[in-house]
Image (cartoon, rainbow, N blue to C red):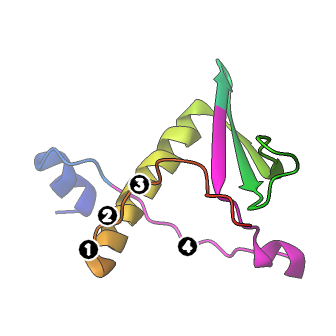
Amino acid sequence: MSDDERDANNARPHVHQHQMAIQADAATSLGVYANLMMVSHRKEEFVLDFLFVQPQQAAPGQTVATLRSRIVTTPEHAKRIVRALQENIQRYETAFGVTAEATDLPRNVH
C-alpha cells in the first residue's frame, strides 16, 4: 500500500515535503531587526510592514518607526505564514518555555 493510499484510508491529508536550495547575497542573509509589525490587506493581497521603533524619541510624545522591510503576499500564503509561525512558536516554547506576548511598543530608553 502506498503512502497516498494509507493517507486516504486514514482520512489524513498527504503532506509533501520538498527540499529547496536558498540563495541570498551577503547583505540579505544578515537580515534586518524589527520590533513592530503592521498588517494591512485588500481582496488580492496582504501587506506585512516590519518596522523598527527607535528607543529615543524624535520629539517629546512622538514615536518614530522606520520601515525595515515590506512583504506583499496573497491571502493563501498569508495563511501558510500564520500556520508556520504557530507551529514554530509551539516548538520554541516546548524547548525553551512559554513566552509572554508583547503588549505595547518598546519602552523608550533615555
Report the residue that reaches farthest toward the left: 10
Q: At label 4, which amino acid type do we have?
A: Gln
Residue designated by label 3: 101
> Residue 63 appears in which quarter of the rendering?
top right
Q: Position of residue 20 (x, y in %)?
A: 62, 71
Q: Secondary structure at mark 2?
A: helix
Q: At label 3, which amino acid type do we have?
A: Glu
Residue designated by label 2: 90
In the rendered view, would you say 43 is above or below 85? above
Image mark for residue 19: 4
Q: Nearer the viewer, residue 8 or 87?
A: 87
Q: Secondary structure at mark 4?
A: loop
Which of disc 3 and disc 4 is earlier in sequence?
4
Mark 2, Cα crowd under 10 Å, few <14 / some 14-19 / many 20+, is some
Which of disc 4 and disc 1 is earlier in sequence?
4
> Residue 98 appears in which quarter of the rendering?
bottom left
